[in-house]
Structures are given as structure tokens and as C-alpha cells.
């Protein structure tokens, strides 16, 4: 049963795994993904290499959990946003929360949204966590009335909804819409468009590429979000 008390051994294992991941996050912050090394983690926390491998079978196993945890951290901030007002105000708040987490945790943001790690495949669970990040955007864009210039893209996403039951279920979970509702592909189009808009600006910021330029990154993102809200005629 899920409410059953954990044994001391289970609690110790959970605590040790958390300590290993905390050490890995520190290495990630200091040297990027290339700096994450299991043997160095073991030495840093006073554990032998073979002992550490009882908790994580490989570096990729550890990275996979870090990816899932990072998505969950971002999704948690997104869930805190008040969507009751809807429209462009809610969209701006969601984008601000996305950027706020990334600026606060740049190494984790680059882990999940940066250059793919050679040979590493993110766990399937990360797709669900990423959808949890974009889910609230679906609710906002379900209210949209996209400009005619958006028609070709909306049509492609309408077909995607008809072809992919998992995507249709995801949209329905957040909006209450079926794949046949006219607003469903609008919601999906808006959420997917918001992602590269935010990622393009935020990834350049956290990687330091805006350094020395004559603008505030937050202002740039706000302007991009406003243009997106205009394209969907959000109130």
C-alpha cells in the first residue's frame, strides 16, 4: 500500500540516492554534463565506487533521474501560476515562470533543453513531465482565435490530434476538449508555438549570449509573448 510506512533500510536508500543526486547537480553546475562523474561523486560523499553503483547502475541512469527531477521542478513552478484571469495576462505569467526557473537553475535548464548528451537517451517519463510543463499553456490558448496566417499550422496540429490518441488525451486533460472540437488544435498550436518562443530567448540568456547587449532578456521575452498573444487574439 502506498501509505505503508517505509522501513529504515528503505529510508536510508532514499536518502542516499538523494545525496548522490545533490552531488551530481553540484558537479553539473560546476562543469556541465561532462563534469558529472560517478566515481568523483562517490569520493565526495565518502562512498566507494562499487557501493554507489548499487544506487545508480550507470551515469546515464543517474542523468535520467536528474532529467525527470528537473522537469518536475520546472512543472512545479508552472503549476503555481494563477490562470484564473486567462488570456495574455496568464500567458505572460506562465512565460515568466518558465524563464524564472531557468534563470534560477541554468545548469538544470540546459540539461533538459540544451545540447543533447551524446549517447544518452532521456527516459520515456520525461515526455510526460515535459507535457506537464506545457499543459497550462493549452488552457490559455484554448481561448484563442488565431489569425488566418496560422491556418496551415493549425490544420497540421488538427491532424496530429486525430492521429495520436496520447496527444489528444493530453489536450483533453488540460482543456476538457475532444480532438474534434475546433478549439483543440488551436490550444495545441499555441502551446507548441510558445515552447520555441520561450526556449529561444531563455536558452540564449542562460548560456550568456545576451551579455553586453542593450536589452533586458525579460523585456525581450515579454515582447515575444505579446506578439504570440496578438497572433491568437488573446484577450
Image (cartoon, rainbow, N blue to C red):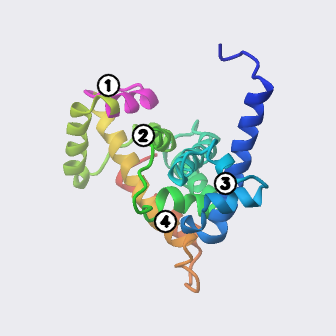
- At a point 23% along the width and 55% down the height, the residue shown is 149
Q: CA distance from mark 4 to mark 2?
A: 34 Å
- The percent coordinates of residue 28 (x first, y second) are 62, 63
> First in sequence: mark 4 or mark 2?
2
Q: CA distance from mark 1 to mark 2?
A: 24 Å
- The percent coordinates of residue 29 (x first, y second) are 65, 66
Mark 1 vs mark 4, foreground winner is: 1
Q: Image quarter for residue 46?
A: bottom right
Q: Where is mark 4, residue-wise?
A: 223
- Residues shaded magenta: 167-180
Q: Is residue 94 in view from this perspective? A: yes
> First in sequence: mark 3 or mark 2?
3
Q: Where is mark 1, residue-wise?
A: 178
Q: Quick one: label 1, few (<14), some, or many (20+) residues within 10 Å? A: some
Q: Where is mark 2, residue-wise?
A: 124
> First in sequence: mark 3 or mark 1?
3
Mark 3 vs mark 2, foreground winner is: 3
Q: Where is mark 3, residue-wise?
A: 49
Amino acid at each position: 500500500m502506498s501509505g505503508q510506512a517505509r522501513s529504515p533500510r528503505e529510508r536510508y536508500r532514499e536518502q542516499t540516492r538523494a545525496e548522490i543526486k545533490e552531488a551530481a547537480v553540484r558537479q553539473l553546475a560546476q562543469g556541465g554534463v561532462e563534469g558529472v562523474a560517478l566515481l568523483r561523486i562517490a569520493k565526495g560523499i565518502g562512498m566507494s565506487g562499487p557501493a554507489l553503483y548499487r544506487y545508480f547502475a550507470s551515469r546515464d541512469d543517474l542523468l535520467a533521474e536528474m532529467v525527470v527531477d528537473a522537469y518536475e521542478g520546472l512543472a512545479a513552478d508552472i503549476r503555481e501560476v494563477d490562470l484564473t484571469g486567462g488570456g495574455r495576462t496568464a500567458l505572460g505569467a506562465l512565460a515568466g515562470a518558465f524563464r524564472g526557473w531557468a534563470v534560477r537553475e541554468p545548469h538544470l535548464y540546459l540539461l533538459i533543453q540544451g545540447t543533447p548528451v551524446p549517447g544518452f537517451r532521456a527516459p520515456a517519463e520525461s515526455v510526460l513531465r515535459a507535457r506537464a510543463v506545457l499543459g497550462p499553456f493549452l488552457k490559455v490558448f484554448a481561448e484563442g482565435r488565431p489569425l488566418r496566417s496560422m491556418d496551415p499550422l493549425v490544420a497540421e496540429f488538427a491532424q496530429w490530434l486525430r492521429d495520436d490518441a496520447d496527444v489528444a488525451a493530453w489536450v483533453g486533460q488540460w482543456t476538457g476538449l475532444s480532438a474534434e472540437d475546433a478549439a483543440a488544435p488551436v490550444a495545441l498550436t499555441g502551446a507548441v508555438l510558445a515552447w520555441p518562443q520561450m526556449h529561444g530567448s531563455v536558452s540564449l540568456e542562460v548560456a550568456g549570449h545576451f551579455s553586453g547587449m542593450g536589452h533586458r532578456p525579460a523585456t525581450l521575452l515579454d515582447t515575444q509573448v505579446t506578439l504570440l498573444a496578438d497572433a491568437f487574439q488573446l484577450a
